[in-house]
Amino acid sequence: MKPVLTAIVAMDPQRLIGAKGQLPWHLPEDLKFFKRTTSGHALLMGRKTFDSIGRPLPKRRNLVLTRDPTWSAPGVEVLHQLSQLPPIRPEERLFLIGGAELYSQLLQHCRELLITHVKEEYRGDTWFPSYQDRFAKTEILQETADFEIARWERRGTDPKSTGPLSSARQRLS
């Protein structure tokens, strides 16, 4: 079975996701949601995202995509091409956690987005690609004074089908 790809991201009203390699905000409740949702699953991220985190995230399978053939880090599975994506275990989900370049390349292959919509606008230098024309908000999962977490599903997707990640592997490798 091919893995279903779910992007998980926090953004401000202008789709800002980063400032100088870091999150522009600190929202502990959103971080708890991220941990609760992704624990026990596989995370796909770019090397810059991994570097900004600084370590493998515990209780998760950390898959890092990098162009640098010499890069390695303890506790991560290094990929140099998407075609190297290892099999995802049946009990795992595959979460795309950034950065901006991977979101742009793989958004078309995501079936679902879990978006934390931060209500305040921030300054930064990294944005999430436009998604509203391809995805529809289907559920609000959590809401606070500072943010709303919503599930967005790809328009026109059969919820029983598996994800199209195998074609992404071919196109991006």
Image (cartoon, grey):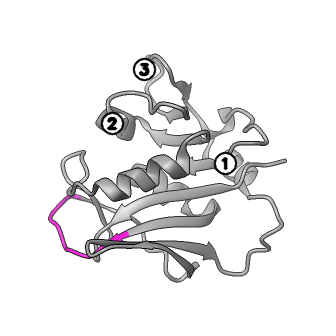
Q: What amino acid is labelled 2 in the image?
A: Ile
Secondary element type, mark 1: loop
Within 10 angstroms of label 1, few (less than 14), some, or many (20 or more) residues?
A: some
Specify which label sits upstream in the sequence, 1 or 3.
3
The residue mark sitting in front, 1 or 3, is 1
In the rendered image, residue 18, in percent from the top left (x then y), is placed at 26, 55
- Dot 1 or dot 2: first in sequence order is 2
C-alpha separation, residue under disc 1 versus residue under disc 3: 25 Å
Q: Name the residue under label 1.
A: 93
Q: Residues within 10 Å of mark 2 (few under 14, many from 20)?
A: few
Residue interval drawn in magenta: 117-125
Q: Is the residue 172 above or below the residue 53 in the image?
A: below
Q: Where is residue 52 in the image (x, y as percent from the top left)?
A: 29, 37
SS state under label 3: loop
Residue at x 48% of width, y 30% of height: 58
Element class at badge 2: helix
Residue 58 showing in the rendered view:
yes
Q: Where is residue 53 in the image (x, y as percent from the top left)?
A: 33, 36
Q: 29 or 15: which is nearer to us?
A: 29
Mark 3 residue crowding within 10 angstroms, few (<14) / some (14–19) / many (20+): few
Quarter assignment of residue 156: bottom right
Residue under numbered circle 3: 71
* Residue 99 horizontal side relative to residue 171, left or right: left
- Amino acid marked by disc 1: Arg
Residue 53's mark?
Answer: 2
Q: Find the distance from the CA under tag 1 to the CA under tag 2.
A: 20 Å
- Specify the amino acid type for callout 3: Trp
Separation of residues labelled 3 and 2 (CA atoms):
16 Å
